[in-house]
Image: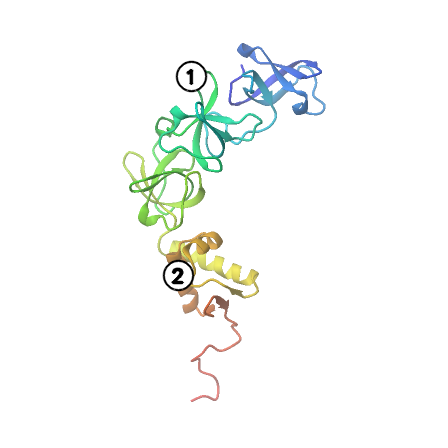
């Protein structure tokens, strides 16, 4: 049986000038156009294909892989808006994915925006569509995360408290405004951390780890960047939060803590502007040297 919006292993029935036809079960014979037929395909062979509807609403097969299939969340780019139908998204196939206006939960995105969506099979039309109404599609299983754990996030939308974000592709969490230490936008994919897990799968998020856990890896990253740049960088505790986040993936507060730790360890010096590696063979100002009293 061929499932719309998913990968299927279907048997090759016969060949035509337009492509090969596959056994689609209740969907009948499904065309795999010639340009997608793998070299060396034979009759009765089982092929893994993705099944969807083309621009003429026909069930069709492809060996291309979309950016998301039915049952998955994804951050997709808006490529067009139809005033009656909805928003069209690029999901990696010739026919764009429709996000109907009825499936929008809040604002109306514009071309060039990215949006977090869930891909589903619409029961009324039997078509693959996207939705931003997530609640019934999130996992009901307990969120087995631990405080401080690093997790992949996709920003869903802004709320009066901060930002909702999809955690690990299964649960929704809240990134409080005070912990949003970088500019964020819907559809943005970013790494974050678990700040707390409350009863009812309520998850608090942060863009930074806490305490030593966030400083130690960052100090290593700064040293690596310094070495790669020849020993000097134009970043210090006066640099912009956006620039720090882009290069080091950390907040300005975490970056300043890491610089302080490296300075106390005499591994860097401030050049104002910027920082530089300290040459361990040279004495630092104030160090005692032989012959001094």
Q: Residue 153 has which mark?
A: none
The residue sitting at 40% across, 45% down in the picture is 184
The residue labelled by disc 1 is 123
Left or right of residue 145: residue 225: right
Q: Residues within 10 Å of mark 1 (few under 14, many from 20)?
A: few
Among the two numbered marks 1 and 2 on one chain, the one whose residue lies closer to the N terminus:
1
- Residue 100, quarter of the rendered image: top left
The residue sitting at 59% across, 20% down in the picture is 61
The residue lying toward the viewer, choosing from 152 and 164, is: 164
The residue labelled by disc 2 is 256
Instruction: Name the spot of residue 272 as percent of width and height, x first.
Output: 45, 69
The residue lying toward the viewer, choosing from 7 and 36, is: 36
**CA separation in Å, label 1 and label 2:** 53 Å
Instruction: Name the spot of residue 94 as percent of width and height, x first.
Output: 58, 27
- Residue 149, quarter of the rendered image: top left
Q: Tell me the element at label 1.
A: loop
């Amino acid at each position: 049986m061929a499932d719309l919006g998913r990968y299927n292993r279907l048997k090759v029935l016969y060949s035509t000038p337009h492509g090969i036809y596959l056994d689609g079960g209740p969907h009948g014979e499904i065309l795999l156009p010639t340009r997608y037929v793998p070299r060396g395909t034979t009759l009765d062979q089982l092929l893994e294909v993705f099944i969807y509807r083309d621009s003429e609403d026909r069930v069709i097969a492809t060996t291309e892989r979309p950016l998301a299939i039915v049952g998955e969340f994804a951050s997709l780019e808006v490529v067009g808006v139809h005033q009656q139908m909805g928003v069209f998204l690029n999901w990696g196939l010739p026919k764009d994915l429709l996000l109907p206006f009825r499936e929008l939960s809040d604002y109306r995105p514009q071309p060039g925006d990215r949006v977090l969506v869930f891909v589903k099979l619409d029961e009324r039309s039997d078509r693959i569509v996207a939705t931003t109404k997530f609640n019934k599609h999130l996992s009901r299983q307990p969120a087995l995360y631990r405080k401080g754990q690093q997790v992949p996030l996709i920003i869903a939308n802004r709320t009066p408290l901060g930002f909702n974000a999809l955690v690990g592709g299964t649960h929704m969490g809240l990134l409080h405004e005070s912990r949003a230490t970088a500019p964020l936008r819907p559809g943005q994919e970013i790494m974050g951390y678990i700040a707390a897990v409350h009863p009812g799968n309520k998850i608090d998020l942060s863009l930074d780890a806490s305490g030593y856990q966030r400083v130690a890896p960052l100090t290593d990253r700064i040293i690596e960047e310094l070495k790669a740049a020849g020993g000097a960088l134009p970043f210090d505790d006066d640099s912009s939060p956006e620039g720090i986040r882009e290069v080091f993936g950390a907040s300005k507060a975490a970056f300043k803590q890491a610089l302080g730790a490296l300075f106390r360890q005499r591994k860097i010096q401030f050049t104002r502007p910027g920082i530089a590696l300290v040459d361990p063979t040279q004495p630092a100002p104030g160090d005692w040297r032989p012959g001094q009293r």
